[in-house]
Image (spheres, rainbow, N blue to C red):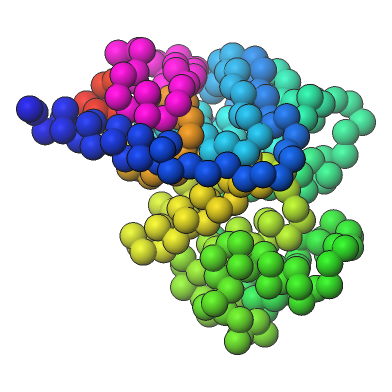
Amino acid sequence: MSSTAQSTNSLSSVAANHAANRQPGSAPLGSGLEARGIHAWFGKHHALENVSLDFAAGTVTALIGPSGCGKSTFIRTLNRMHEFIPSAAMAGEVLLDGKDIYESGTDVTKIRLQIGMVFQKPNPFPSMTIGQNVLSGLKLAQIKSEKKNDDLLEECLTRSGLWSEVKDRLDAHAGGLSGGQQQRLCIARSLAVNPKVLLMDEPCSALDPGSTLRIEDTIGQLAKTMTIIIVTHNMQQAARVSDYTAFFLSDGGPGQMIEVGPTNEMFSRPKDSRTENYVSGRFG
Ligand SMILES: Nc1ncnc2c1ncn2[C@@H]1O[C@H](COP(=O)(O)OP(=O)(O)OP(=O)(O)O)[C@@H](O)[C@H]1O
Ligand SMILES: [Mg+2]
């Protein structure tokens, strides 16, 4: 057996193991997120062509593909961040629970509260305390949680897997946390506003393996109550955390979504030879 075949096999067994152990939550969720016919441009550069993808509520979808194929661009269209880039344009629809987030008159701030985002580089407010960071989204949006601040803090930090490490220093500055802790703090901050969808663009790429595994555990827990879309270059990570995987590729032209399917199938018997070449490490 070649080493390539072995690595693909182990990816598919990791993915099959994830699928077998996946325990969906029991909370009633909405109908999820649907992207329909998404195109994106930067000036004249057509970066993304006609991408349609469904993200069922309570599932984790990994977006994979070589650098520059449009993964970050696509994920930014899902919570209306793309339009804030100068020169950026887009076409298509994104439906959250059946309603287009691009419909005229939609309050973009409200959309961002429902569709949160965690970035590659942790971006806590370093001079705010850990506690203030978690609650900052509520403050910015001028909304009040039904829960008491202390309860909400504990809940969000527990869900993001950070509580036990910071419970005795909630008043310390967030800048003093490690990179992995800062990323889990950013996840806690996203959770405080109770989003339905969490977008994560390479959330572990700057982290050590231990912090990465903790965040993957966190993703597994969160997926019981929300829909998660994660961009990753790490195939093992996609196999460990995701229910579905979508493969993007730019073949000289705009980026396209080549294939989507259950993660264990994408890693064991992809339909498109380009997917197979990518997941087996032949390019990218
Ligand atoms: N702000 C921008 N201005 C102009 N072009 C951009 C901008 N952001 C991305 N692009 C272009 O759009 C295309 C897709 O980029 P994008 O960042 O979405 O790729 P990606 O798949 O996320 O790559 P990576 O894996 O390296 O993060 C690329 O050709 C890129 O150069
Ligand atoms: Mg990117």
Task: Name the residue at 46% across, 53% down.
Answer: 216
Q: Residue furthest left?
A: 1
Task: Name the residue at 36% across, 64% down.
Answer: 210
Q: Is residue 75 above or below residue 265?
A: below
Where is residue 35 drawn, in percent x and y?
66, 23
147 left or right of 239 in image: right
Task: Name the residue at 51% across, 50% down.
Answer: 220
Rendered image quadrant of residue 11? top left
Taking depth in this image into account, of 276 and 224 the one nearest to the observer is 224
Taking depth in this image into account, of 268 and 108 the one nearest to the observer is 268
Task: Name the residue at 41% across, 63% down.
Answer: 211
Rendered image quadrant of residue 206? bottom left
Q: Residue furthest right?
A: 105
Q: Is residue 150 above or below residue 112?
A: below
Taking depth in this image into account, of 128 and 203 the one nearest to the observer is 203
Q: Which residues are magenta?
A: 249-275
226 left or right of 114 in image: left
Residue 272, magenta (yes or no): yes
Q: Is residue 53 above or below residue 224?
A: above
Q: Is residue 227 visible?
A: yes
